[in-house]
Image (tube, rainbow, N blue to C red):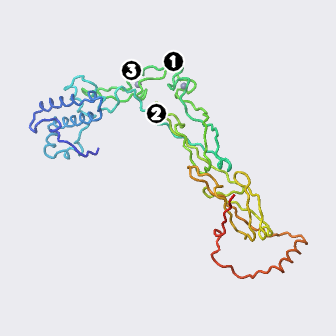
């Protein structure tokens, strides 16, 4: 045990370095009674520290051999093997002499809680639920209900695990104290009762519903509001919908982990959406007004005369929502001019005619004409 600061044992007991064994015993009795934690319900922890401190001082100074080591080498002389204070050992034998059957020191030193029945409450486990959404559901958000199996308190036995009407009985092994006392020398040491694990009570007949567990697995329906714009990997936390905490502790949380299915033609990058629209040579050369699919119904896409393949048109604010409450993303239409592959005889003739009157110099294109330069905004 690491000790950062240790007070002088004589100072702790308030005696001089030449004090007799009887003086030391009397001083310790005074200290121990003063600092008994039961007398300090407001600041029990601090009192316990003081109480242990004085006990430690007493255990050393009342032992002539240890006292000599301490006088010569100080605290460090006692910290090695054979030194120090063994709280589970012989020191307890002295208490009986000093205090008689005074209030439960054994509890204090065995580290057990007095009363034994105060089982520690803990926070319940978190639960994970995986959920798959369509692209549209993720885009618009949904209110849905999910069913999750989880541990709940058994209603039949009120969480006690005992069959209705039978209740619990005091543990016979420990007589309901939750602890077993062992006589050791003059003193008594207590241990947690193995029969009831310190609860002090035992179930007479097990509840049929929960087989004595006090909890049952139940399917619970939870209403879930999924905000628009969620994506694969989004984790929604539903507070307090995890498993209930043992011994009345707070419930854990439920985490809904989302997976969003891909859309057949919208590609998602953050809150922005991308979509490729094929157009004909004629539409590219002459311009056209198209009806193209958007997230919420069709959008009008006006292709200007002389549009090149690869041009990108942006419709601001028609992308996905930011689930964290930010603005909306944009919707991008990427135009691809389709080169005709299966021509009829007539179409071939027409294109041949076009070819003779439309000459292109097949020289390398200039650098720096990136796709982004071709993004054009569409308003309305
Ligand atoms: Zn039950
Ligand atoms: Zn017991």
Q: Which of 106 and 250 is in front in this view?
A: 250
Q: Residue furthest right?
A: 345
Determine the CA span between mark 2 and mark 3: 27 Å
- Which residue in the structure is indicated by mark 3? 175
Is 148 drawn above or below residue 76 in the view shown?
A: above
At 64% from the left and 48% from the top, the residue drawn is 138
- Which residue in the structure is indicated by mark 1? 166
Name the image quarter holding the N terminus: top left
Please tell me which of labels 2 and 3 falls first in the chain.
3
At 35% from the left and 30% from the top, the residue drawn is 113
At 75% from the left and 82% from the top, the residue drawn is 361
Please tell me which of labels 3 and 1 falls first in the chain.
1
Q: Nearer the viewer, mark 3 or mark 1?
A: 1
Q: Position of residue 158 (x, y in %)?
A: 52, 24
- Which residue in the structure is indicated by mark 2? 249
Instruction: Name the quadrant where ligand 1 sits.
Output: top right
Determine the CA span between mark 1 and mark 2: 26 Å
Q: Which of 347 and 164 is in front in this view?
A: 347
Q: Where is residue 323 in the image (x, y as percent from the top left)?
A: 58, 49
User: Crowding at label 2, few (<14), some or many (≥20) Cα neighbours within 10 Å?
Assistant: few
Q: Nearer the viewer, mark 2 or mark 3?
A: 2
């Amino acid at each position: 045990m690491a000790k950062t600061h240790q007070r002088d044992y004589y100072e702790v007991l308030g005696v001089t370095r030449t004090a007799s064994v009887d003086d030391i015993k009397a001083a310790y009795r005074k200290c121990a009674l003063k600092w008994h934690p039961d007398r300090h319900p407001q600041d029990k922890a601090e009192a316990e520290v003081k109480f242990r401190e004085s006990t430690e001082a007493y255990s050393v100074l009342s032992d002539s051999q240890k006292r000599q080591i301490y006088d010569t080498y100080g605290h460090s002389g006692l910290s090695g093997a054979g030194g120090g204070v063994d709280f589970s050992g012989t020191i307890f034998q002295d208490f009986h002499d000093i205090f008689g059957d005074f209030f439960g020191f054994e509890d204090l030193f065995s580290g057990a809680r007095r009363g034994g029945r105060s089982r520690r409450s803990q926070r319940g486990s978190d639960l994970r639920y995986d959920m798959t959404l369509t692209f549209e559901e993720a885009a618009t958000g949904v209110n849905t209900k999910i069913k999750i199996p989880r541990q709940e308190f058994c209603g039949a036995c009120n969480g006690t695990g005992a069959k209705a009407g039978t209740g619990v009985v005091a543990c016979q092994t420990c007589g309901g104290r939750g602890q077993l006392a062992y006589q050791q020398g003059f003193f008594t040491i207590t241990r947690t009762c193995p029969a009831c694990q310190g609860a002090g009570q035992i179930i007479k007949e097990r509840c049929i519903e929960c087989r004595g567990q006090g909890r049952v697995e139940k399917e619970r329906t939870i209403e879930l509001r999924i905000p628009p714009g969620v994506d694969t990997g989004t984790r929604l936390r539903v507070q307090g919908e995890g498993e209930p905490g043992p011994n009345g502790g707070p419930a854990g949380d439920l985490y809904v982990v989302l997976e969003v299915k891909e859309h057949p033609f919208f590609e998602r990058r953050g809150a922005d959406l991308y979509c490729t629209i094929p157009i004909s040579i004629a539409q590219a050369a002459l311009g056209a007004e198209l009806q193209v699919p958007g997230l919420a119904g069709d959008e009008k896409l006006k292709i200007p005369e002389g549009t090149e393949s690869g041009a990108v048109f942006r419709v601001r604010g028609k992308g996905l929502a930011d689930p964290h409450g930010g603005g909306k993303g944009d919707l991008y239409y990427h135009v691809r001019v389709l080169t005709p592959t299966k021509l009829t005889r007539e179409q071939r003739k027409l294109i041949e005619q076009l070819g003779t009157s439309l000459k292109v110099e097949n020289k390398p294109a200039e650098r720096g004409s990136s796709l982004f330069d071709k993004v054009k905004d569409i308003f309305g």
